[in-house]
Amino acid sequence: MDYSLSPPPSGGDTVIPDPWYGNIQYLLNISTIGLFFCIFIFLFGKLRSDHRRMPGFSALATKLLAVWHATGREIALHCGADAAQFLIIEGGSFVVVLSIGVLSICVLLPLNMYGGSQVINDEFSKTTINHIEKGSSFLWIHFVFVVIVVLLAHFGMSLIEKRLKVTRFRDGKWELK
Protein backbone atom coordinates (compact mmCIF):
# COMPACT_ATOMS: atom_id res chain seq x y z
CA MET A 1 0.00 0.00 0.00
CA ASP A 2 1.12 3.50 -0.77
CA TYR A 3 0.46 6.01 2.01
CA SER A 4 1.78 9.12 0.30
CA LEU A 5 -0.44 11.57 2.17
CA SER A 6 -0.97 10.19 5.64
CA PRO A 7 -1.40 6.83 7.26
CA PRO A 8 -4.93 5.61 7.96
CA PRO A 9 -6.30 6.09 11.47
CA SER A 10 -5.38 3.40 13.91
CA GLY A 11 -8.09 1.10 15.15
CA GLY A 12 -9.99 2.46 18.12
CA ASP A 13 -7.22 3.95 20.27
CA THR A 14 -8.55 7.52 20.15
CA VAL A 15 -11.82 7.87 22.00
CA ILE A 16 -13.39 11.27 22.52
CA PRO A 17 -15.32 10.88 25.80
CA ASP A 18 -17.83 13.72 25.59
CA PRO A 19 -18.35 16.36 22.95
CA TRP A 20 -16.29 19.31 24.22
CA TYR A 21 -17.50 21.67 21.48
CA GLY A 22 -21.01 22.01 22.95
CA ASN A 23 -19.81 22.62 26.48
CA ILE A 24 -20.63 26.13 27.73
CA GLN A 25 -17.87 25.98 30.34
CA TYR A 26 -15.31 25.25 27.63
CA LEU A 27 -16.55 28.17 25.52
CA LEU A 28 -16.42 30.55 28.50
CA ASN A 29 -12.92 29.40 29.41
CA ILE A 30 -11.54 29.81 25.90
CA SER A 31 -13.22 33.24 25.56
CA THR A 32 -11.73 34.38 28.87
CA ILE A 33 -8.28 33.21 27.84
CA GLY A 34 -8.65 35.12 24.55
CA LEU A 35 -9.79 38.26 26.40
CA PHE A 36 -6.81 38.21 28.76
CA PHE A 37 -4.45 37.53 25.87
CA CYS A 38 -5.79 40.58 23.98
CA ILE A 39 -5.48 42.77 27.09
CA PHE A 40 -1.94 41.49 27.62
CA ILE A 41 -0.97 42.34 24.03
CA PHE A 42 -2.51 45.81 24.39
CA LEU A 43 -0.83 46.59 27.69
CA PHE A 44 2.62 45.27 26.92
CA GLY A 45 2.72 45.76 23.17
CA LYS A 46 0.84 48.86 22.13
CA LEU A 47 1.25 50.98 25.24
CA ARG A 48 4.91 50.12 25.57
CA SER A 49 5.56 51.16 21.96
CA ASP A 50 3.77 54.48 22.55
CA HIS A 51 5.77 55.27 25.70
CA ARG A 52 9.31 54.48 26.76
CA ARG A 53 8.05 52.89 29.93
CA MET A 54 4.67 51.57 31.01
CA PRO A 55 2.32 54.41 31.97
CA GLY A 56 0.72 54.29 35.39
CA PHE A 57 -2.90 53.56 36.19
CA SER A 58 -3.88 57.24 36.38
CA ALA A 59 -2.33 57.92 32.96
CA LEU A 60 -4.24 54.98 31.47
CA ALA A 61 -7.48 56.14 33.08
CA THR A 62 -6.96 59.70 31.81
CA LYS A 63 -6.27 58.46 28.28
CA LEU A 64 -9.34 56.19 28.27
CA LEU A 65 -11.60 58.94 29.64
CA ALA A 66 -10.35 61.37 27.00
CA VAL A 67 -11.19 58.86 24.28
CA TRP A 68 -14.58 58.13 25.86
CA HIS A 69 -15.59 61.81 25.96
CA ALA A 70 -14.29 62.66 22.47
CA THR A 71 -16.91 63.95 20.06
CA GLY A 72 -17.27 62.94 16.43
CA ARG A 73 -15.76 66.26 15.34
CA GLU A 74 -12.69 65.78 17.57
CA ILE A 75 -12.20 62.25 16.28
CA ALA A 76 -12.53 63.45 12.67
CA LEU A 77 -9.97 66.21 13.29
CA HIS A 78 -7.50 63.88 14.97
CA CYS A 79 -8.00 60.65 13.00
CA GLY A 80 -9.99 61.62 9.90
CA ALA A 81 -13.60 61.30 8.77
CA ASP A 82 -13.21 57.56 8.17
CA ALA A 83 -12.52 57.00 11.86
CA ALA A 84 -15.63 58.97 12.83
CA GLN A 85 -17.73 56.96 10.38
CA PHE A 86 -16.24 53.71 11.65
CA LEU A 87 -17.13 54.60 15.23
CA ILE A 88 -20.70 55.48 14.21
CA ILE A 89 -21.06 52.09 12.52
CA GLU A 90 -19.48 50.23 15.45
CA GLY A 91 -21.56 52.06 18.06
CA GLY A 92 -24.81 51.51 16.18
CA SER A 93 -24.02 47.86 15.55
CA PHE A 94 -23.19 47.41 19.23
CA VAL A 95 -26.57 48.86 20.25
CA VAL A 96 -28.43 46.60 17.80
CA VAL A 97 -26.57 43.45 18.88
CA LEU A 98 -26.88 44.34 22.57
CA SER A 99 -30.64 44.88 22.31
CA ILE A 100 -31.09 41.57 20.48
CA GLY A 101 -28.88 39.81 23.04
CA VAL A 102 -30.80 41.19 26.01
CA LEU A 103 -34.10 40.17 24.42
CA SER A 104 -32.73 36.70 23.68
CA ILE A 105 -31.50 36.17 27.23
CA CYS A 106 -34.65 37.56 28.85
CA VAL A 107 -37.23 35.92 26.56
CA LEU A 108 -35.92 32.96 24.57
CA LEU A 109 -33.45 31.43 27.02
CA PRO A 110 -36.02 30.93 29.82
CA LEU A 111 -38.59 29.80 27.25
CA ASN A 112 -36.24 27.18 25.83
CA MET A 113 -35.00 25.96 29.21
CA TYR A 114 -38.28 25.76 31.10
CA GLY A 115 -40.89 25.60 28.34
CA GLY A 116 -39.38 22.66 26.53
CA SER A 117 -40.14 19.06 27.35
CA GLN A 118 -38.09 17.26 24.70
CA VAL A 119 -35.74 14.68 26.25
CA ILE A 120 -32.16 15.80 25.58
CA ASN A 121 -29.03 14.58 27.38
CA ASP A 122 -26.83 17.52 26.42
CA GLU A 123 -27.20 20.48 28.79
CA PHE A 124 -26.31 23.01 26.09
CA SER A 125 -29.04 21.73 23.76
CA LYS A 126 -31.64 22.44 26.47
CA THR A 127 -31.02 26.15 25.86
CA THR A 128 -31.87 25.90 22.15
CA ILE A 129 -35.05 25.49 20.13
CA ASN A 130 -34.34 21.73 19.97
CA HIS A 131 -35.70 21.42 23.52
CA ILE A 132 -39.19 22.51 22.38
CA GLU A 133 -41.38 19.79 20.91
CA LYS A 134 -42.70 19.93 17.35
CA GLY A 135 -46.15 21.47 17.12
CA SER A 136 -45.80 23.37 20.40
CA SER A 137 -47.30 26.84 20.61
CA PHE A 138 -43.95 28.05 21.98
CA LEU A 139 -42.58 27.82 18.44
CA TRP A 140 -44.77 30.81 17.52
CA ILE A 141 -42.90 32.87 20.10
CA HIS A 142 -39.69 32.00 18.24
CA PHE A 143 -41.27 33.09 14.97
CA VAL A 144 -42.44 36.41 16.44
CA PHE A 145 -38.99 36.88 17.95
CA VAL A 146 -37.36 36.42 14.54
CA VAL A 147 -39.67 39.09 13.11
CA ILE A 148 -38.74 41.43 15.99
CA VAL A 149 -35.03 40.79 15.38
CA VAL A 150 -35.40 41.59 11.69
CA LEU A 151 -37.26 44.81 12.50
CA LEU A 152 -34.67 45.84 15.13
CA ALA A 153 -31.84 45.18 12.70
CA HIS A 154 -33.59 47.11 9.91
CA PHE A 155 -34.39 50.16 12.03
CA GLY A 156 -30.97 50.08 13.69
CA MET A 157 -29.18 50.03 10.34
CA SER A 158 -31.39 52.81 8.97
CA LEU A 159 -30.53 54.98 12.00
CA ILE A 160 -26.85 54.28 11.41
CA GLU A 161 -27.30 55.28 7.77
CA LYS A 162 -28.96 58.57 8.79
CA ARG A 163 -26.07 59.36 11.12
CA LEU A 164 -23.58 58.53 8.37
CA LYS A 165 -25.17 61.03 5.99
CA VAL A 166 -24.01 63.79 8.32
CA THR A 167 -20.36 62.70 8.10
CA ARG A 168 -20.29 61.86 4.41
CA PHE A 169 -17.80 63.78 2.24
CA ARG A 170 -16.23 65.69 5.12
CA ASP A 171 -12.54 66.12 5.60
CA GLY A 172 -10.48 66.28 8.80
CA LYS A 173 -11.57 69.89 9.39
CA TRP A 174 -15.22 68.80 9.25
CA GLU A 175 -15.83 70.78 6.05
CA LEU A 176 -17.77 69.47 3.08
CA LYS A 177 -15.67 68.55 0.07
Image (cartoon, grey):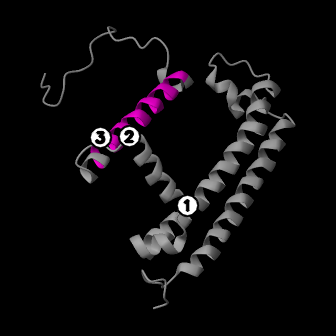
- Circle 2 sits in a helix, a strand or a loop, which is it? helix
Q: Residues within 10 Å of mark 2 (few under 14, many from 20)?
A: few
Q: Nearer the viewer, residue 156 or 148?
A: 156
According to the image, label 2 marks what residue?
A: 38
Per the model, the C-alpha gap separating discs 2 and 3 is: 10 Å
Instruction: Determine whether 9 is above or below 169 in the image.
Output: above
Please tell me which of labels 3 and 1 falls first in the chain. 3
Q: Residue furthest bottom?
A: 177
**Element under label 1?**
loop
Image coordinates of residue 150 in percent, x first then y, are 71, 58
Which quadrant would residue 44 be assigned to in this image? Answer: top left
Left or right, residue 143 beside residue 8 = right
Q: Which mark is residue 69?
A: 1
User: Residue at 22% of width from left, 48% of height from top?
Assistant: 52
**Residue stretch rendered in magenta on the structure:** 25-46
Give the percent coordinates (x, y) of residue 6: 18, 26
**Image spot of residue 82 (x, y percent):** 44, 73
Q: Decide: marks 2, 1 in contact (CB < 8 A)?
A: no
**Is residue 80 shown to the viewer in this render?**
no
Mark 1 residue type: His
Amino acid residing under circle 2: Cys
Residue hosting label 3: 44
Badge 3: how crowded within 10 Å, few (<14), some, or many (20+)? few
